[in-house]
Amino acid sequence: MPDFSIGVDLGGTNLRIAAVSTDGQLLEKVTVPTRIDLGADHVVDNMCGAIRSLSDRYRSRGTFLGAGIGVAGIIDLEAGIVRKSANLPGWENYHVRDQIERRLGARIFLENDAKVAALGEQWLGAGRNVDNMAMLTLGTGIGGAIVLDGKIFHGMNGMAGEFGHVTVEPNGVPCGCGNRGCAERYASASGVVRMAREAIASGQAPELAKAASSEAEFSAKLVYDLAMQGDEAAQRIFRRFGCVLGIMLADIVNVLNLPVYVIGGNVAAAWDAFAPSMFEELHQRSLIYAATAPGDSSGESQDTAQSVGIKQWKTVVKRALLGGDAGLFGGARLTTIVG
Amino acid sequence: MPDFSIGVDLGGTNLRIAAVSTDGQLLEKVTVPTRIDLGADHVVDNMCGAIRSLSDRYRSRGTFLGAGIGVAGIIDLEAGIVRKSANLPGWENYHVRDQIERRLGARIFLENDAKVAALGEQWLGAGRNVDNMAMLTLGTGIGGAIVLDGKIFHGMNGMAGEFGHVTVEPNGVPCGCGNRGCAERYASASGVVRMAREAIASGQAPELAKAASSEAEFSAKLVYDLAMQGDEAAQRIFRRFGCVLGIMLADIVNVLNLPVYVIGGNVAAAWDAFAPSMFEELHQRSLIYAATAPGDSSGESQDTAQSVGIKQWKTVVKRALLGGDAGLFGGARLTTIVG
């Protein structure tokens, strides 16, 4: 039997914990509630209990290599601390990694959730045939990660891959980061809701207005459903979403020149609504993409590709394959690839 | 005595060739004209003659490790071919690397000029204290390169670091690449001339108009000189130049999170005219930069830095140090770091 690790998704509501073998088999998955209200020590005790019982169950079959924990927010990788997380208020000075290591006597890795998701997709999902890729996680905002040589590329201090704050509209909507026109102000669940409210306020979106007044919670999903039912105002919002993603992806392709870009997160479910305008924009804005897009048949970019001799290369933008399990696989993977 | 290599800058007008020791000493530098009109074989013969005489001179003192050649344009790294270069028309199917290797019996590396310049700056110039950096080369257009772990990061097929085609204005000026609003349509010598011509056409730039009509060649240098003399229209052009660089740098900082970004190329000489607006824009548009800028004293970003615990990290944007020799050093360096 191969050895195994534990991957943990430390969310604000649930703790999801999985035992994964080093050959990529999901052995078992458990979910326990995250009782943030009872304090960090309590959450960590709970997590350690679940990790211990899961690892005890598979210890006879292989060596337990440790656990990798994904958390939304800014992670201090050196200190093993969650510096800033909407899900874990008040944890800023709590030494998560050390506390867990002490309790379990095992190697523990703490990592940003978008980063472990990317690692999971590279290992077993949409990027499994390449060593280098980037991933966008479309949720309330946009998470991002770059994987190089099968490892997370952190940059100087773990902040590499902040694709959500690429400027797509220099005089656009203000963002909490201080910039204007960040991609995540458009191509995210919160962006969709904001654009929908603006469309309603402008009086140009009667169906959206009706939905907003009748539903308890006005969500991006609702706007997506209307778009799929043919509502023009809702479709316009997702076209804008796609254009913004296309501008941002073109920048990333031009900067990184990777073979695979994976799009995941809850909002990737709206793929049908945003992908056409995304690809159109990307194709137009990145010569590298136009020259290497798979199955491309436009005369101009074929000529370009031929003239620069890069026809044999392909740049692929695709949907994530592992859904919410990507982070569990990626967390487990951390224990085998970090030195 | 340490071993040595040869760095070559294969320009359209001149061939610049330098012998550089592995400990970074420039032993000797020669320049010979590039007689493009006499054909590729002639140019390569000339180059090989100069490399041979230079290497013979230092062979008694150390082993000759080979040569690295920087060329403006798109390089096919695998084939050792110049796929596209304004300086070397008609070389598309000429096997430069193999031809030189055959003549010299030494290891030869062919590389894009902006990439070798970055490698030189990382080895001995503005990036010498870091392993990871990016460099922008501001010339007629914008060249770019990413250095990771002291090596050029090529991406899939050598196109990584195309910073000049990052979109800074989604509905901006059309670019030859197919995109609109590429950074290099503004923050380059050709961008300055274009903006100056537009200012003249609008009737808002009398001094520029006067200069344009009296000078034989209307250049970015001329616009810079007027800006330095206090001409408001010329200054406006360089402020725009700086803003565009700031938007683009903010994107790169957010994506790559590197410690050092080096700005070189001829047009970097206009630093005083564009740097203030560049830093202002960058500071405003990248939270990562704002939180890690050296010597920053604004209350808000200090608080941000503190809250995310990254005060000890610094992101530095600085001018290149080696001028035109960066590519010679970088070319020589290629022979010792490529496996």
Image: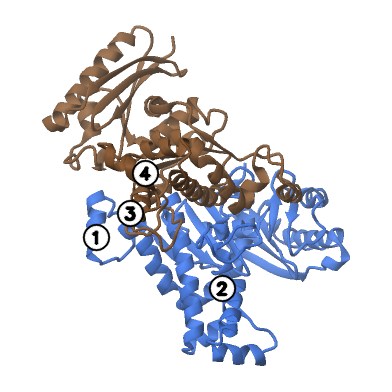
Chain colours: A brown, B blue
Amino acid type at mark 4: Leu
Q: Chain of mark 3?
A: A
**Nearer the observer, B176 or B149:** B176
Circle 4 or circle 1, nearest the eye: 4
Q: Secondary structure at mark 3?
A: helix
Q: State the residue position of label 3.
A: A201
How far is the residue under mark 3 from the one under mark 1? Answer: 38 Å
- In the rendered image, which quarter is residue A72 located in? top left
Q: CA distance from mark 2 to mark 4?
A: 51 Å
Q: Earlier in the sequence, mark 3 or mark 4?
A: 3
> What's the mark number on residue B302?
1
Residue A61 - label: none
Q: Dot 4 corresponds to which residue?
A: A208
Eye-nearest disc, 2 or 3: 3
Residue A278 lies, with reference to residue B39, above or below; the image says above
| Quarter of the figure with the C terminus of chain B | top right
Mark-to-mark CA distance, 4 and 1: 42 Å
> Are the residues under marks 3 and 4 on the same chain?
yes
Q: Nearer the viewer, mark 2 or mark 4?
A: 4
Mark pair 3, 4: CA separation: 10 Å
